[in-house]
Amino acid sequence: MDRGEARLPRSSPANPVLRSPDLHQRSDAPRCSENVMNHILGHREPGIPRPLPPITAGEMLRSHRIRLGYTSRESFAFQHGHSPRGYSDLETDNARMSMATMYALREQLRMGPVAKDQLFQLVTGAPPALKALEVDPALDRVTARWADAHVHTHQDPVVLMDGGWHTRHFNAAWAQIFDAIPPHPRDHPLDNPMRFLLFHPAAAQMFPDWEKWLVTAVTQVAWHYDLHPENPHLRDIRRRIAEDDFLEDLYVNRARQELTDHGTDAILQGDVDERPVLIDGKTMSILLTVMSPGHAQECGYQLFKLTLLGPYPGNVTPAPSRAPCPAAVDGPHDDHPAIITAPEQAVMPGPDRALTPGQLLRAYRERLGLPRHTVLRGAHLPVRTDRTLRKYEGDEAKPRSEYLPGLARVLTMSVWVAQYLDILVTRREPLPLGVNLPAEVTGRCARWAREHVTHQAAPTALMDGAWDVITCSSSFHELFRHVPADSLSHPTVNWLRYVAFHPDARVTLVDWYERWLIPALTDFGEVLTRYAHAVQPEQKALLDEFEADPLLWDAYTRRVGQVLQRAGAGVATRGDGAVRKLSVPSHGDAAGARTELSVRITTGVPLFGRPWGLRLGAFTIID
């Protein structure tokens, strides 16, 4: 199988998706050529209705399988972990296809967006929904490799979503907890967890303390919408929220209050948070952790992991009664998102955004009881009258970005609120707060690391914004145990310094200069380019050390400069998923022989760690 191909784990007793009945229930119909004849003549298993469209779901599976070069159903089934007879029944339309299996097969057969929607219609009888992002085959290939390392390896439920919260990959455990949810064209949790949480009636029963989940959800929507208000998919979610009085109240009141009081921290608090979930009729505690793939962070991709902790010990708040979900599965609707193609088609009554720059400025000024002229003088703004601040507060004009630090200071905003003010005004990612975690965040970091670093089979390390290693897995220690101790440049101390300065790097890292040093310096150079006006002292110290080494300085100023100029922003993260080689000492070989290992490098960014530039690096051995 192509390693870039999306897949679920192979069939096993612990894999409930791929051992589901629709892949194992066998009809008595003959196989091989007789199956083809039965299909032509319309002989079908009792209870399975004859399809009305001129093409069936099974025919779609067959055509895409043949296009990929699989000459038999059995070869495809074995390659992707399906039961051969179970898959054969699906391809000959002699078994019903579950939602989880449909989503898995769409990826495994590399269907394009049109084919995916067509298969959805054939399986569910429902119209497809508009996707949030244009399909990018190159991005999808990298994402599939990334998911192999960070989605399918987990035993707890994990899902990877794009910037519109559409699922890109999920594991068997994620599919299992939503197994009882009926098909839905827009709001099924295997298609879009955010829309499921907001709009599906079953969400209130599945998520005790549902309102807490909703506040987190609408805050996330508000954040995305503030950054991308022109996105038609986000406009459609916003419109649907406005049509529900309960959700609209949460959006314009609770979400606004959360963002006003806590700024960006209201978004970060969703990472490493314990919550109750109803699973198999029992209320269980889960730990929610969030990570963005390094290569798709700017596209809004997020991984959610639900770690099952045990029975929930406390009481839960009953969910409010809800009206039926407005989008039923029996036909198209006037409010289907596919019709939202331009801003004028999504006009909504009432406030459009949860919080505006003017509302935030006015709220803090009024809390302090300050007149406008006092704020202007305290912020040292070069304006003469109160009229300017009145325009800012009325959202008739936006303050210049260089005015924001002064306004935040005189209004006694926290760093989190000041960050969100910057987001509202500039629509850009806020500048980092530093590279070292403050003491109040170290506990959250340790808990996050236990879920994504400490117990990982692949060698994995979590680093701060200066590439200092915060923690790493035992397998990471084992991989580099041969490296001589160094308090500054050992790979378990600082990865970038190891690549650049440690003598062992030129031996262990195969094709050290081209395959390891240039990408590492490019990553460093991109960070400095992105935050040119906020370079941290630790990063400046690294730069000074590079400048003192002629080889490193030539690589940084000439080669890395050429790469960044040619490829632009994001070039470093596009190396996510690259395969490189290590040369490590052979175990038990007294002669000092070495073994070459091919490793796939994948990176991620913890949601809580974004303000400090935290990054995860994993070395998945693929030999």
Image (spheres, rainbow, N blue to C red):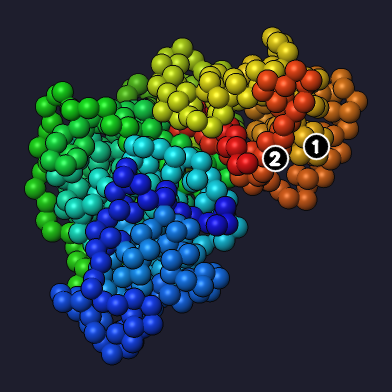
Residue nearest the observer in this picture, 54 or 467: 54
Q: Which residue is mark 1?
A: 511
Tag 1 secondary structure = loop
Residue 533 - label: none
Residue at image point 21% right, 37% down: 277
Residue at image point 57% right, 57% down: 2
How far from the left and from the top, in percent, is residue 24? 28, 60
Tell me the quarter of the image containing the C terminus.
top right
Horizontal side, residue 311 vs residue 269: left or right? left
Q: Which residue is mark 2?
A: 580
- Kind of residue indicated by mark 1: Asp
Q: Residues within 10 Å of mark 1 (few under 14, many from 20)?
A: some
How far from the left and from the top, in percent, is residue 124? 26, 69
Residue 426 visible in this rendered orientation of the protein: no
Q: Quadrant of residue 44?
A: bottom left
Residue at image point 50% right, 45% down: 148
- Kind of residue indicated by mark 2: Arg
Horizontal side, residue 66 vs residue 309: left or right? right
Q: Residues within 10 Å of mark 2 (few under 14, many from 20)?
A: some
How far from the left and from the top, in percent, is residue 136? 56, 60
Residue nearest the observer in this picture, 25 or 588: 588
Residue nearest the observer in this picture, 324 or 237: 324
Residue nearest the observer in this picture, 516 or 185: 516
- Tell me if residue 62 comes above or below residue 466 in the rendering: below
Residue 448 visible in this rendered orientation of the protein: yes
- Tell me if residue 317 comes above or below residue 568 in the rendering: above
How far from the left and from the top, in percent, is residue 510? 77, 35
Is mark 1 in CB contact (under 8 Å) with mark 2?
A: yes
- Tell me if residue 322 comes above or below residue 212 in the rendering: below
N-terminal of the pair, mark 1 or mark 2, is 1
